[in-house]
Amino acid sequence: MVMPGEAPDDQSKLLADMRARVESAAAEIDRLTSELLAREEWVDELESVMDMVLGLLDTPLVVVGDDRRIRALSRGAGERLTGDAVVGKPLSSVVPEAVLTALEARLATTARGPDDWEVDGAEPGLIPLDVQPLPSGGAVIVFGAG
């Protein structure tokens, strides 16, 4: 269909330009999709490695999200922490309130590394030895071997 004042060649050129842009966008979408799939495979592999390493680790170590729910835990943590220490449970269900309060205070100051912890009434194996904040707001917590 020829628009008034427009030559058929102009319309053909416009249509060819639009097709070229659509093809370019489709190629970019394909490239990004391939990149996303590769990254998902990489994440799956890293998660498998982490699960394997945590399953072999006797040190009580817990990874919590920004919501303070357990995202991962080592075999040692599953064996030594009180309560039902499983992925998805709140950290507060497996550590005493005094320990949780000390952890929250430590995370609020963004302190890193081993330090002296003062936690009244906590068993030695439930006193954190090290807390490493994660960029997402979560943390990796290493407890005493107690």
Image: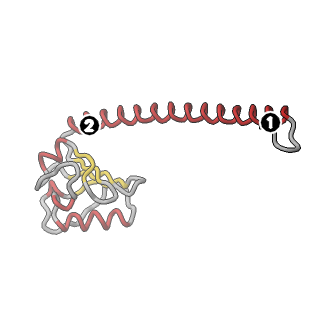
Q: Are marks 2 and 1 in contact (CB under 8 Å)?
A: no
Q: In the image, what residue type sits under mark 1?
A: Gln
Say which residue appears at 85% left-offset and 44% top-offset.
Answer: 4
Residue that badge 1 annotates: 11
Q: Position of residue 113 (x, y in %)?
A: 35, 54
Q: In the image, what residue type sits under mark 2?
A: Asp
Q: Is 112 on the left-hand or right-hand side of 143?
A: right
Q: Position of residue 48 (x, y in %)?
A: 30, 33
Above or below, 112 relative to 29: below
Q: Position of residue 23 (x, y in %)?
A: 65, 31
Among the 4 quarters of the image, the one containing residue 126: bottom left
Residue 51: mark in rendering:
2
Above or below, 77 relative to 66: above
Say which residue appears at 61% left-offset and 31% top-offset.
Answer: 27
Q: Is 22 on the left-hand or right-hand side of 54?
A: right
Q: Is residue 9 or residue 56 the one in the foreground? A: 9
